[in-house]
Image (tube, helix red, strand yellow):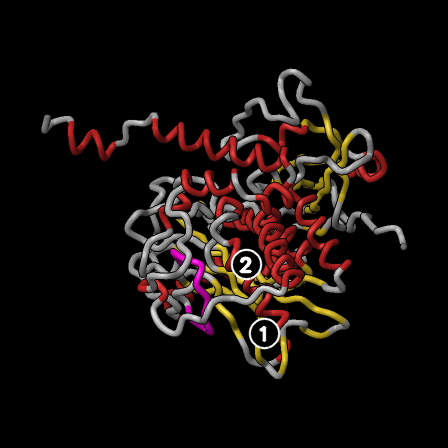
Amino acid sequence: MTEQDFSLPPGIHTVAIGMGDLNGIMRGKRIPATHWDTICQSGNALSIALLAIDMTSDVWDTPYVNFDNGYPDMHMFPLTKPVASPWEDGVAICMARAEGTDHLPVPIDPRGALVQQVERAAAMGYEVKTGTELEFYLLDPETLLPKDQGTQVYSMARAAEMEHVLGPIRQQINELGIPIEQSNPEYAAGQVEVNIRYDEALKSADQVILFRSLVKKLAHVHGYLATFMAKPFIDQSGSGFHVHYSLWKDGKNAFADGGKLNKTGMSFLAGLQNNMADIALAGSTTPNAFRRRQPYTFCPTNASWGYDNRTVGLRVIQGSDNAVRVEKRDASADCNPYYLLACDIAAGLDGIEQGLEPSAPCLGNAYELEDAMPLPGDLAQAVDLAKRSALMKRVMGEDRQTILIQQAERELEFLANQVTPVEVERYMRNF
């Protein structure tokens, strides 16, 4: 195995290096180019608390890192070759990996959970490939409202109006090595979707971490706030994270047989279907994320499946052998891609190992099904299922699972202790 090249492009004076935290938010440091060789050899120290803080950077005692052990260090090492930023002269951007001071993987690093499932698939003879679709809002940073009006999903006129910001997002993120396939206006003012080309699962998840960080940076440059928050407006479309799964062997799609989903693909689908409710917390981690889960919103409410059907939780797409895949549609755009993909892949591989078969496909409106397995409708239900999920504990490990559940319970408690503006408006003058 040849040593990876982490050399800097010409003219670089600073390297922005970061990794995904508990919530898949990219966090890290900026390193002078004069210090880069040292970073490549010895890493850069920072607290393991990075992997056990919430989205606001609040910290609490967790099983692995806490006040009793002093919140010890880990080290970041470069994971990808630094690439020059198209919008910051002299700055290169680089993904990092975590390593403990013992030179071993950090047990609560979310990326490690996905590494293990990719390795499991490889031992079974498969390469996992995933394609990711993320929705997000581009808002006025002062008003926190869309700058445009109306829905006009897929409108080419609206796409042209937003090209001054979406064009750079597509083009410049492509230049940084994340292959963007397309963008389009989505089903609300200010909402867009950008699709990343399918690739090996671990690389795909790394790209999501970097992609979300880059979108927020580019949006800021062009006078917008980009948010991947699941449901920023209660009466508008939520932002989802759809993942397309396929397994490959000897350069061929192991799900495909004459352009149809074969027995292997059906068993993977069945594994997802059987575990979809239990692992919901991996894809929706806040109370807000569950506001998306409403009937007739194109967000699934049950674990049904169907062929090219956007009302189901698991959509099977067929065509050429290379295109055959299973799309899982329930996750929120703000979730951690490592946990989402790790739990989904584990469920699918379990289905293959156990020779499972899915239910009958839904041929109509999945929201009207009475016998389909319901997905949790709020965070409290998802937490309860996660606590009892043997699959989540096996995939994430007890410490990772505990930290994710602790964060969810803290979010539930935080919101329960608020008096909202709606309550003040509705009750204060009337009682």
Q: What amino acid is found at the position of numbered circle 1 in the picture? A: Val
Is residue 86 in view from this perspective? no
Of pointers 1 and 2, the one earlier in the residue sequence: 2
- Which of labels 1 and 2 is toward the front? 2
Q: What amino acid is found at the position of numbered circle 2 in the picture? A: Leu
CA distance for labels 1 and 2: 16 Å
Give the class, few, some or many, for how many residues have Cα within 10 Å of label 2's Cα (few <14, many ≥20).
Answer: many
Q: Name the residue under label 2.
A: 272
Could you say which disc has been placed on residue 44 in the image?
Answer: none
**Residue found farthest to the bottom:** 258
Could you say which disc has been placed on residue 324 in the image?
Answer: 1
Quarter of the image holding residue 370? bottom left
Query: Is residue 336 one of those drawn in magenta?
Result: no
* 393 horizontally vs 303: left or right: right
Query: Is residue 306 one of those drawn in magenta?
Result: yes
Q: Which residue is more in the foreground, 172 or 153?
A: 153
Seen at 88% across and 51% down, the residue is: 3
Region in magenta = 300-309
* 407 horizontally vs 373: left or right: right
* 116 horizontally vs 282: left or right: right
Q: In which quarter of the image is the C terminus?
A: top left
Seen at 58% across and 22% down, the residue is: 61
Q: Quadrant of the N terminus?
A: bottom right
Quarter of the image holding residue 192? bottom left
Give the class, few, some or many, for how many residues have Cα within 10 Å of label 1's Cα (few <14, many ≥20).
Answer: many
